[in-house]
Image (cartoon, rainbow, N blue to C red):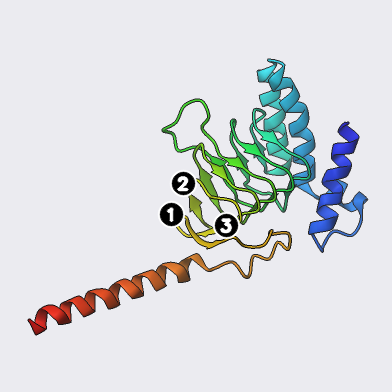
Amino acid sequence: MAFKRLREDIDAVLARDPAARTGFEVLLCYPGVTALCWHRGAHWLYRHNMKLLARIISQLARFFTGIEIHPGATIGHRCFIDHGMAVVIGETAEIGDDVTIYQGVTLGGTGKDTGKRHPTIGNGVVVSSGARVLGPFKVGDNSKIGSGSVVLEEVPANCTVVGVPGKIVRRGGQKPTDLNQIDLPDPVAVELECLRRRIVMLENKLREQEGK
């Protein structure tokens, strides 16, 4: 079973990362694969009430890979953590199948919740570099979270979210299997456009008042 999951992880990297050349290279050089292997052992220990040992293993994995996954987190099949440095995944986070997570991503809590504190990530979701998904809500299947976004509320399936705080800028998009982050809307540009429209609206209202 463990070997099958490892094979799935390697195949997922080969399918999604054009820089990956061979399975042996992926096994040796991709910290995301290493972190997931350590996590599965730690998660098993955590579920069998050996929580201290599970935490020790997760911290060792963090030391060697730069990826911090709490042993209580649930991760599905074929998860691809690309580059991986500074990725943080909280205790009650749940990650579906075929999810892609880039460097600097946090799947964390807000500090206001108890029990289920971390997000649930649906199948086929892409979480781009530097994004923060914070709170006990779900990101629907096949959605995309843009780079640097801060997502604080539920995201329906097949949506694209950008900005701080995150806003839905595209619905019903195609399944994000291409990993194309270039075509995601620029969150800064989106916010500037909103400000520009706001200024135009206020100028028009000011002209109307001056006319009266």
Name the residue that disc number 1 marks: 165
Specify which label sits upstream in the sequence, 2 or 3.
Answer: 2
Q: Is residue 160 above or below residue 89?
A: below
Name the residue that disc number 3 marks: 159
Specify which label sits upstream in the sequence, 1 or 2.
Answer: 2
Label 3 environment density (alpha carbons within 10 Å; few <14, some 14–19, many ≥20): many
Q: In this view, does 27 lie above or below 193?
A: above
Q: Is residue 138 above or below residue 203?
A: above
**Disc 2, disc 3: CB below 8 Å?**
no
- Residue 33: x %, y % from top left: 79, 44
Element carrying mark 2:
loop
Label 1 environment density (alpha carbons within 10 Å; few <14, some 14–19, many ≥20): some
- Residue 146: x %, y % from top left: 57, 59
Q: Which amino acid does label 3 sit on?
A: Cys
Specify which label sits upstream in the sequence, 3 or 1.
Answer: 3
Element carrying mark 1:
loop
Q: Which amino acid does label 2 sit on?
A: Leu
